[in-house]
């Protein structure tokens, strides 16, 4: 297993900004859902209650809590794709709950309609306080969780995907760069990475998202990565920038219907 490169990309999100993001997301739910904020948020939380709590324990004593969903009435003869979701810094900790409280890919994929349309295994780990997803202990733990999942369930190893927001957006780029032959596709939201790693990512299907008015993570982080890949001749990079969105662009990104059609159509090939 390739050792990931240590990156020093730190995010600082003031409490006031986090509260502003939470309020904005609540309004967004109201607008998109067409109902009351409380009822919609309750419905979203009920979906993630379908994810079972689990804990990865490394031989060195390091632990990483995570939530996992496997389809009901799973057909053991049918291989299922896996989606790994990486939360932002504001939902780190050890309670194994906050990472599913933030609106993410699992809230969309766990709707009744999408559970039938896109049956898959969902994994949502929780980063420890003070560590990012590209930490020397966290990244190997993520890979072990994925490998254990593949050993315990009928996983389609050609269809393992990674996505995340904010710190998780950085984590998505980082996981793809560290393990370019492992993931079938990635969808980083309001993140970024070191353009020097662009050659590692050239052949991986990536759909990146960012808000043009993001005050927390400069959109140039994503723009620069996209440009570096395009300059290398990549035909597998997609980019959506929301001109009027700030940091909470994941609310728009994860509601993009085309995202899931695109994601689940991607398969790892020998050339990746």
Image (cartoon, rainbow, N blue to C red):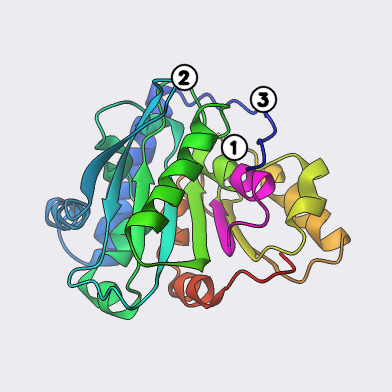
Q: Which residues are magenta?
A: 173-188
| Horizontal arrangement in the rendering, residue 272 relative to residue 29 (left or right) | right
Quarter holding the C terminus is bottom right
Instruction: Determine the residue positioned at 28% across, 36% down.
Output: 98
Within-10-Å neighbours for mark 3: few <14, some 14–19, many 20+: few
Residue picked out by circle 3: 8
**Is residue 77 in view?**
yes
Label 3 vs label 1, nearer the camera: 3
Instruction: Determine the residue positioned at 56% across, 36% down.
Output: 215
The answer for how far apart the CA atoms under marks 1 and 2 are is 18 Å
Q: Quadrant of residue 252?
A: bottom left
Residue picked out by circle 1: 217
- Residue 233's x, y, as percent? 86, 66
Residue picked out by circle 2: 130
Looking at the rendered structure, the secondary structure element under dot 2 is: loop
Quarter holding the N terminus is top right
Looking at the rendered structure, the secondary structure element under dot 3 is: loop
């Amino acid at each position: 297993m390739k050792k990931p490169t240590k990156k020093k990309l730190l995010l600082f999100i003031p409490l006031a900004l986090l509260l502003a993001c939470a309020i904005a997301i609540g309004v967004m739910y109201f607008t998109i859902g067409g109902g009351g904020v409380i009822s919609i948020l309750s419905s979203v939380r009920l979906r993630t209650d379908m994810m079972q709590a689990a804990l990865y324990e490394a031989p060195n004593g390091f632990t990483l809590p995570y939530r996992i969903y496997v389809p009901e009435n799973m057909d053991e003869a049918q291989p299922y794709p896996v989606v790994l979701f990486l939360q932002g810094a504001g939902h780190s900790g050890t309670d194994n709950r906050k990472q599913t409280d933030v609106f993410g890919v699992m809230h969309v994929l766990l709707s009744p309609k999408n559970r039938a349309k896109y049956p898959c295994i969902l994994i949502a780990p929780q980063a420890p306080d003070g560590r990012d997803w590209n930490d020397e202990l966290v990244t190997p733990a993520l890979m072990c969780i994925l490998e254990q999942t593949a050993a315990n369930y009928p996983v389609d190893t050609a269809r393992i995907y990674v996505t995340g927001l904010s710190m998780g957006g950085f984590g998505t780029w980082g996981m793809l760069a560290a393990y370019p032959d492992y993931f079938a596709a990635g969808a980083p939201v309001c993140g970024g990475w070191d353009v020097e790693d662009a050659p590692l990512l050239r052949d991986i299907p990536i759909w990146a998202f960012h808000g043009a008015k993001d005050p927390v993570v400069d959109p140039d982080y994503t723009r620069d990565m996209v440009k570096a890949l395009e300059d290398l001749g990549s035909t597998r990079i997609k980019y959506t920038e929301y001109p009027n969105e700030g940091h909470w662009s994941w609310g728009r990104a994860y509601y993009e219907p085309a995202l899931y059609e695109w994601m689940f159509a991607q398969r790892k090939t020998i050339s990746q």
